[in-house]
Image (tube, rainbow, N blue to C red):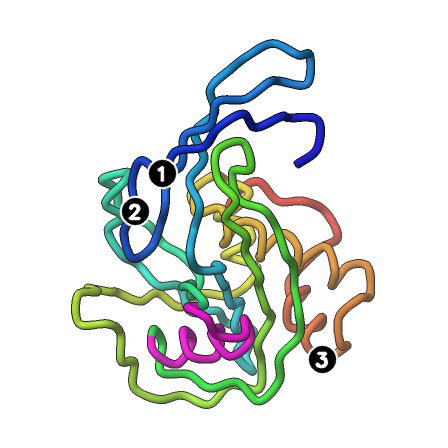
Amino acid sequence: MGPWTVQSATEVYDNAWVRVSDHAVLRPDGSPGQYGVVHFKNVAVGVLPIDADGSVCLVGQHRFPLNAYSWELPEGGAGGEDPLAAARRELLEETGAKAASWAPLLECDLSNSVTDERAVCFLAWDLSAGAANPDPEEVLSYRRLSFSALHDLVLAGEIRDSLTIMMVLSAYAQARAGRLPAEIAKLILAGDDGNSRSGP
């Protein structure tokens, strides 16, 4: 487990999605301490879907932990599924869209000081539209805008969801660096003047 020494571990909470454990530890400097960790049972998945006109669909919903409304790219959890299969399912459920073309976008550890949650995100294009079919308890709204406008919202701090921010910035950087297929990079960079923008 690296330079930390675990002396004991106790499970203090468990539900269908997370498990919380409390650890008596020796820190890297040798001092004793206590460390709580939230273990997520599903890998998080995210999708950045780019339509043929360069537009992107955001999903809006009220997030309970923050008691705030959040605009996000399609996201969810891979409950024992392959992350790509889960991403396909989440895109279909939340937006009704199917994508013929997929590419890995990024993998990351989320809030690694308190949780082992991991995320796998994808870029999706060659989209075909359909009817959304979210989970019954989800009350969603939708907003369509250009990638350039979404990038501006991220830079302005108006998008606060971490996966959405990471996907947008990663896609933009990879498009600028020539690391994405030419057709999708062209859509991402449409309207870009080569300089960072601070607002719409």
* Rendered location of residue 42, percent (x, y): 44, 60
Please give the label number shown on residue 11.
1
Please give the label number shown on residue 81.
none
User: Mark 3 sits on what residue?
Assistant: 183
Query: Which one is in front, 56 or 83?
Result: 83
* Rendered location of residue 134, percent (x, y): 26, 74
Query: Which one is in front, 186 or 33?
Result: 33
Report if residue 86 lies within the magenta region: yes
| In this view, 79 is above or below 113 | below
Instruction: Tell me the mark number nearer the camera, choosing from 1 and 3.
Output: 1
**Which residue range is magenta in the image?**
79-93
Q: Is residue 76 left or right of residue 117?
A: left
Marks 1 and 2 in Cβ contact (< 8 Å): yes
Q: Earlier in the sequence, mark 2 or mark 3?
A: 2
SS assignment for the magenta stretch, majority = helix
Instruction: Tell me the mark number nearer the camera, choosing from 1 and 2.
Output: 1
Q: Residue at the spot x=46%, y=86% of the render?
A: 98
Q: Is residue 51 visible?
A: yes
User: Mark 2 sits on what residue?
Assistant: 14
| In this view, 163 is above or below 11 | below
Marks 2 and 3 in Cβ contact (< 8 Å): no
- Residue count near mark 2 (Cα–Cα under 10 Å), binned few <14, some 14–19, many ≥20: few
Cα separation between marks 1 and 3: 49 Å
Q: Amino acid at mark 2?
A: Asp
Q: Amino acid at mark 1?
A: Glu
